[in-house]
Every structure is written in structure tokens, then in C-alpha cells.
Amino acid sequence: MKEQKDLIIEALEQIRPYLQRDGGDVQFVDYTEDKVVLVELQGHCAGCPYSQATVKGGIEQILQELFPGQIEAVEAVNAFSFE
């Protein structure tokens, strides 16, 4: 049986092409005990003024619909500062 992290990564793989069309990308960083998915926005998404809308209105909404009750939030982080 797949772990929650693996399922989230698979779901993000389905979202990535939409971001890549606009020159951006998303990378999974972690899934916390508090049910928060941490992602790193890359490419054009990293510096885009609409990146917060992409995370909350796009990625978070999709993941919450796919995994009801299992994801409280999605937050963008810098992977280097997370380590």
C-alpha cells in the first residue's frame, strides 16, 4: 500500500504539466504531521506575483479534493531553507 507522501507526489505529477505550460513547475518537499503539504515552486512560478494564488487556489484546492480530510493546507517553501 502506498504511503500518503507517494500519493501526493503522484497527484502533483498530474498538476505539473499545467504549470510547465507557463514556464513554471512544482516540486514536492514534505508532508507534515499537521497535514500540510510543503512544495517548492520553480521556474516562472517562483517569482510570479500570482504564486500564492497558484498554491492556494490551484494546488491546495486540487489536493484537498483528491484527499478529503487528509490535507489541511499547501504551503510554498524554499527547499534550501527547509533542509
Image (cartoon, rainbow, N blue to C red):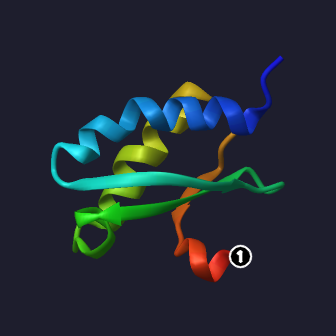
Q: In which quarter of the image is residue 8?
A: top right
Vertically, is 27 above or below 11? below
Q: Which residue: 33% across, 70% down?
A: 46
On-image quarter of the N terminus: top right
Residue 46 in sight from this viewpoint: yes
Give the side of residue 13 with respect to residue 1, left or right: left
Report x, y in % for residue 77: 54, 71
Query: Which residue bears the numbered disc 1?
Result: 83
Q: Left of 46 or right of it: where is 11?
A: right
Identify which amino acid the numbered label 1 is placed on: Glu
In which image quadrant can residue 69 be found?
Answer: top right
Across and down, in percent, residue 17 comes to: 29, 36
| 2 relative position to 23: left or right | right
Please tell me whether mark 1 sits on a helix, a strand or a loop. Answer: loop
Determine whether 10 is above or below 16 in the image.
above
Front residue of 75/43: it is 43
Please tell me which residue lies in front, 42 or 51. Answer: 42
Place residue 49 in its image quadrant: bottom left
Horizontal side of residue 4 vs 52, given as left or right: right
Considering the image in quadrants, where does the C terminus appear?
bottom right
**Residue 9: percent from the left, percent from the top?**
59, 37
How packed mark 1 is, by other alpha carbons closer than 10 Å (few <14, some 14-19, many 20 or more), is: few
Residue at image position (49%, 53%) is: 27
- Answer yes or no: is residue 69 visible: no
Residue drawn at the location 41% of the way across and 29% of the way down: 14
| View extreme (left): residue | 22
Is residue 54 placed above or below 42 in the rendered structure?
above
